[in-house]
Amino acid sequence: MHAWLRYQCRKLFRPRIVTNGGVQIDLGPVAGTRYARSFYRDDHERDEREIVSRHLHPEDTVLELGAGLGVVTIVCCQRVGSERVHAFEANRALEGPLRRNF
């Protein structure tokens, strides 16, 4: 019971804004969820960020389906410019945080 209570308290006071791979992210509605753990560990979509950094060239155009909170999308924008990145997210609950992150 003690460990559970400590965990719940930590969860309440976790920051909503974190940095992942040098990208500042507003977690919005997922801040206190299990999904947010990878953000707090700075390893959310680490493999995807590394692939983008290695293989995306300035003349490329990106279409990202399922942008989520925008971590990979922002990395893509940094590589090719925001005018060459098109991102879509179907989950309406993520629209606010996604727009703030951009």
Image: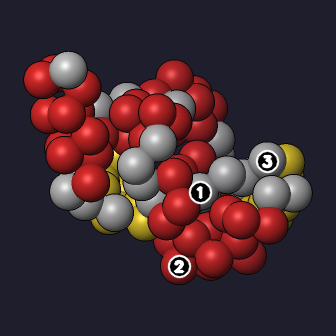
Residue beneath the point at 19% across and 46% down: 9
Q: Residue 69 carries which label?
A: 1
In this rendering, would 85 be left or right of 21?
Answer: right
The amino acid type found where label 1 is placed reads Leu
Applied colour scheme: secondary structure
- Whole-angstrom CA distance, mark 2 to mark 3, is 16 Å
Q: What element carries label 2?
A: helix
Task: Identify the secondary structure beneath mark 3.
Answer: loop
Q: How far apart are marks 1 and 3 (CA)?
A: 9 Å
Q: Which residue matches tag 2? A: 100
Mark earlier in primary sequence (2, 1): 1
Q: How many marks?
A: 3
Residue at point 58%, 30% (across, down): 48
Question: How far across and down, in percent of the image, does residue 73 sit?
Answer: 63, 55
User: Residue 3 or 43: which is nearer the viewer?
Assistant: 3
Q: Quadrant of the N terminus?
A: top left
Label 3 crowd bin: few (<14), some (14–19), many (20+), radius 10 Å = few
**Residues packed near mark 1 inside 10 Å, few (<14), some (14 to 19) or many (20 plus):** many
